[in-house]
């Protein structure tokens, strides 16, 4: 705290030691272009001391502004150009120097603060350093000491900023690489799915429509909160990339069955049904062999259960209602819409209205009734998706 009164020149000069009085060369305070870019803010309620500090800091080359109290200092601390360093008196009316220090550190943890006081109170010094002050100068002090402390505080400030920039850059690189890995993984999955699909559908558009229908239906379920926390944004993202794998087990179905241009016999249909367990078992073995691939769990559930029915009349296990994973129930409805509205070797495509009628008819039979309700809210989007994804003669087998 300054002992002098405003305008008391003799007392003001007492702030600095004899060798630090105005006029002394600031050569030893350092030089260079960088320091001229750093704004310094001086805070002192004593007009004379404040002016003296500002003059001395400007004399060693730094742009410097000043505030008469803590409140004004806080306002200037968030005004461009923002200060890199604050030199503050400890004892001031209103906000004290320590309180100002705490508030400044909350605003910007990298901002450096040098406390200046005429009192050598170790408790206050310890408090200031604990709260993040860079240094604590006791009046009177040498100009050289002030200049050196300012230089070191600013070097520390720039080191912190460089470290932060390095950390942020590192985080950006890690995020970019993670994104690349995930994109590669998703691409591998879709390639695998398309490879399986290509045996009986060479366009692959069925997969794209399926994943879009599934996502749209899941979004509607999430919007209404029908299944609470079960259908989240992450769930929808996983569903979108997992649903194309629903028929991956078709790779294990013989051509004579998969590509038969006529109705399947009962025995052939039994063979066709195996695509669910072939796909599910394959994904399960990958999950069990390679830990940490939880994203495949949903794909596995879908592969196993996308031909189960709400009433228990489906395959391969004949499970019913909530025993069928929700992701599989969504894909079941999406797959059915696509099957109804697509051309097959044995039928022409039905129109959208017929698909809505059939799905509504099978509410609580083939399909989860709550999912049918959600579908009826957003069914027009299904038609929009179908139109958008070029409804070519892309039809997946006859496994409905
Ligand atoms: Fe299937």
Image (spheres, rainbow, N blue to C red):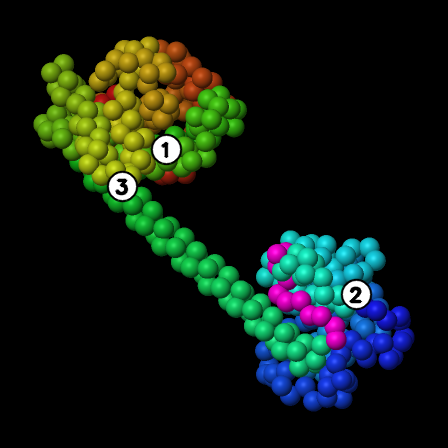
Residue 139 on the magenta span? yes
Query: Image point 51% across, 24% down: which residue?
Result: 225
Q: Secondary structure at mark 3?
A: helix
Query: Image point 40% across, 58% down: which residue?
Result: 173
**N-terminal of the two: label 2 or label 3?**
2
Vertical comparison of 263 with 299: above or below? above
Query: Viewer-proximal residue, 55 or 35?
Result: 55
Would residue 145 be visible to someone looking at this image?
A: yes
**N-terminal of the two: label 3 or label 1?**
3
The spot of residue 266 in percent (x, y) is 14, 14
The alpha-carbon separation of the residues under discs 3 and 1 comes to: 13 Å
Q: Quadrant of residue 290?
A: top left
Which residue range is magenta in the image? 130-140
Q: Secondary structure at mark 1?
A: helix
Which residue is disc 2 drawn over? 1
Which residue is disc 3 drawn over? 189
Say whether mark 3 is within 8 Å of ligand 1: no
Q: Quadrant of residue 10?
A: bottom right
Q: Which mark is residue 73?
A: none
Left or right of residue 198, residue 165 in this image: right
Query: Viewer-proximal residue, 257 or 249?
Result: 249
Which residue is disc 1 drawn over? 239
């Amino acid at each position: 705290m300054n002992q002098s009164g405003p305008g008391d020149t003799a007392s003001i000069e007492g702030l600095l030691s004899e060798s630090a009085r105005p006029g002394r060369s600031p050569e030893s305070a350092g030089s260079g272009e960088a320091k001229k870019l750093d704004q310094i803010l001086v805070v002192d309620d004593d007009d004379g001391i404040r002016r003296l500090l500002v003059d001395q800091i400007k004399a060693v080359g730094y742009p410097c502004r000043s505030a008469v109290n803590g409140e004004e200092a806080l306002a200037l601390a968030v005004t461009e150009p923002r200060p890199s360093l604050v030199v503050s008196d400890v004892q001031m009316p209103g906000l004290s120097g320590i309180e100002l220090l705490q508030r400044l550190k909350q605003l910007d943890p990298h901002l450096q603060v040098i406390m200046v006081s005429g009192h050598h109170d170790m408790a206050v010094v310890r408090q200031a350093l604990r709260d993040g002050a860079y240094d604590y100068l006791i009046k009177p002090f040498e100009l050289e000491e002030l200049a050196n402390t300012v230089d070191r505080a600013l070097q520390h400030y720039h080191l912190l900023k460089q470290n932060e920039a390095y950390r942020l850059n590192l985080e950006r690189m890690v995020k970019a690489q993670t994104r690349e890995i995930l994109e590669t993984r998703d691409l591998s999955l879709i390639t695998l799915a398309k490879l399986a699909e290509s045996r009986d559908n060479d366009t692959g558009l069925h997969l794209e429509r399926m994943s879009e229908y599934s996502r749209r239906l899941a979004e509607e379920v999430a919007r209404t909160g029908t299944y609470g926390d079960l259908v989240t944004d992450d769930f929808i993202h996983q569903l979108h990339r997992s649903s194309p794998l629903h028929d991956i087990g078709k790779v294990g179905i013989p051509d004579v069955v998969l590509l038969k241009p006529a109705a399947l016999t009962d025995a052939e249909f039994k063979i066709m049904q195996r695509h669910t367990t072939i796909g599910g078992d394959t994904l399960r073995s990958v999950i069990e062999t390679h830990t940490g691939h939880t994203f495949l769990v949903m794909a596995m559930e879908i592969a196993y259960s996308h031909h189960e029915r709400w009433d228990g009349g489906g395959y391969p296990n004949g499970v019913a209602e909530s025993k069928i994973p929700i992701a599989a129930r969504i894909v079941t409805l999406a797959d059915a819409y696509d099957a109804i509205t697509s051309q097959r070797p044995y039928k022409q495509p039905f129109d959208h209205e017929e698909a809505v009628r059939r799905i509504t008819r099978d509410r609580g039979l083939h399909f989860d009734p709550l999912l049918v309700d959600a579908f009826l809210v957003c069914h027009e989007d299904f038609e929009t998706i179908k139109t958008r994804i070029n409804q070519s003669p892309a039809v997946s087998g006859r496994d409905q």
